[in-house]
Every structure is written in structure tokens, then in C-alpha cells.
Image (cartoon, helix red, strand yellow):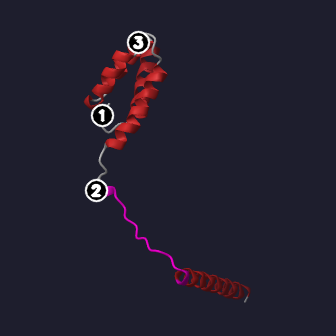
Amino acid sequence: MNEEDYIDEMYSRFTSIVNELRSLGKIYSPHDRIRKLLRCLPSTWRPMVTTITQAKDLNTFALEDLIGTLRAHEVLHQEDKPIKKGKMIALKAYQATQDNLDETSSQIEENKETEEEQIVLTSRRQTN
């Protein structure tokens, strides 16, 4: 797994590899698959791997539970990453006053009238 990969991407690649190996006759036990998944995680995941291996009995731990645990940790891991400066968007905000709302309403009405006039003119041109 690469640093920028998501758990779901890694797991789908892993599953396809295991399925191809199964079709060739090599079958891995759930325990072996869990150990292989934990070994393929990047070094930033090492504290999580250590926690899982110490807290859980990997012989009885379900693969789906492992993936769920890793997904939950990934969400927390993503929140800790700093936001890239190039990806930020700033929007201007202003406080609406009654005058601004009245102006906006009148502009909307004018636009509707202009659109209706254009539709009428277009339909007249088509009939002539």
C-alpha cells in the first residue's frame, strides 16, 4: 500500500490477487490474509498494526472486522493531515439587508420579464 492509497483501494487489489492465487491452487487461511494485510500497510500505520496485533487474537479475528477497523483509523488519519494550500477555496460573504433583498428581488423580476419577452419575440419570428 502506498501512503496516498485508501484502505478500500488496497483491499480491492489484495482481494483480486488472493482470488487469482486461489484459481491457481494457492489458498490462504483468514489468519494468513490478515497477517499479509497488516504487513503491507505503510510505516505510518505501524502503531495501529502493533495495537491490533496485541489487542486481538488474529486466529479468531475476522477479516471484515480488520478492514472496518482500518477504515475507521483511516478517517482519523485523514483528519490529522494538513490541508494543502493549493486546494483551498475562499468565498466572499456579505450581510444581507432588506435593501439588498429588495434589489435582488427586483432584478429577478426584471430577468423573468426579459426572458418572457425574448420567448415571445422568438415564437413570433418562428411563426412569420
| Sequence-first disc among 1 and 2 | 1
**Residue that protrudes farthest toward the left in the picture:** 43
Mark 2 highlights which residue? 85
| Sequence-first disc among 1 and 3 | 1
Q: Magenta segment, which residues? A: 85-99
Q: Position of residue 87 (x, y in %)?
A: 33, 56
Residue 75, placed above or below residue 91: above
Residue kind at label 3, given as amino acid type: Asp
* Disc 1, SS: loop
Between residues 54 and 123, which one lies in front from this camera angle?
54
Please name which of the two marks, 1 or 2, marks the residue nearer to the observer: 2
Mark 3 highlights which residue? 57
Q: Main secondary structure of the magenta part?
A: loop
Magenta region includes residue 92: yes
Between residues 19 and 91, which one lies in front from this camera angle?
91
Indicate left or right for 6 with 84 as reference.
right
Q: Cα distance, mark 2 to mark 3?
A: 42 Å
Split into 4 quadrants, where in the image is the N terminus? top left
Q: Is residue 97 visible?
A: yes
Q: Which mark is residue 2?
A: 1
Residue kind at label 1, given as amino acid type: Asn
* Residue 102: quarter of image: bottom right
Indicate left or right for 106 with 1 as reference.
right
Crowd around label 1: few <14 · some 14–19 · many ≥20 (10 Å): few
* Residue located 40% across and 16% down the image: 56
